[in-house]
Image: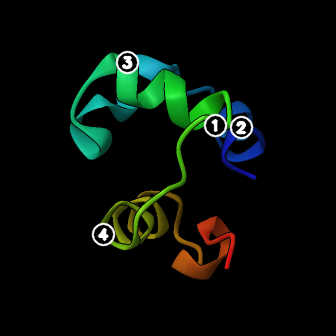
Amino acid sequence: MLLFLMEQRDLRSTELVDIFGSQSAVENILNGKTQIDRSSAELLGQLFHVDSMLFSRA
């Protein structure tokens, strides 16, 4: 879902560093190595104007 929303908004991974803290954390999220935590999901929900639950795997 995150990759789709990024593509729709023409966002690059570097633009998510403020949410995840570092470029390596962004890459880990995008590669599925790390799950998105609740606070990051909330920020992503605000950024993309969607429910934060879209980013939850639970």
- Residue 52 is tagged as none
Amino acid type at circle 4 is Ser
Amino acid type at circle 2 is Leu
Q: CA distance from mark 2 to mark 4?
A: 18 Å
The residue labelled by disc 2 is 3
Evaluate if marks 2 and 3 touch, with contact meaning CB atoms under 8 Å apart. no
The residue labelled by disc 3 is 24
Q: CA distance from mark 4 to mark 3?
A: 18 Å
The residue labelled by disc 4 is 39
- From the top left corner, tell me how far across and down residue 56 is, in percent: 61, 72
- From the top left corner, tell me how far across and down residue 17 is, in percent: 29, 29
What residue appears at the point 41 percent right and 63 percent down from the top-left corner? 37
If you read the primary sequence from the N terminus, does the residue marked by circle 2 or circle 3 appear first? 2
Q: Residues within 10 Å of mark 1 (few under 14, many from 20)?
A: some
Question: In this rendering, which labeled residue sits more in front, label 2 or label 3?
Answer: 3
On screen, residue 54 versus residue 18, left or right, reads right
Secondary structure beneath dot 4 equals helix
Secondary structure beneath dot 1 equals helix
If you read the primary sequence from the N terminus, does the residue marked by circle 1 or circle 4 appear first? 1
Q: Residues within 10 Å of mark 3 (few under 14, many from 20)?
A: few
On screen, residue 52 versus residue 19, left or right, reads right
Q: CA distance from mark 1 to mark 4?
A: 18 Å
Secondary structure beneath dot 2 equals helix
Evaluate if marks 2 and 1 touch, with contact meaning CB atoms under 8 Å apart. yes
Image position of 35 with respect to 39: above or below: above
Image position of 46 with respect to 10: above or below: below
> Which of the 4 quarters of the picture holds residue 58?
bottom right
Evaluate if marks 2 and 4 touch, with contact meaning CB atoms under 8 Å apart. no
The residue labelled by disc 1 is 6
Image position of 51 with respect to 37: above or below: below
If you read the primary sequence from the N terminus, does the residue marked by circle 2 or circle 4 appear first? 2
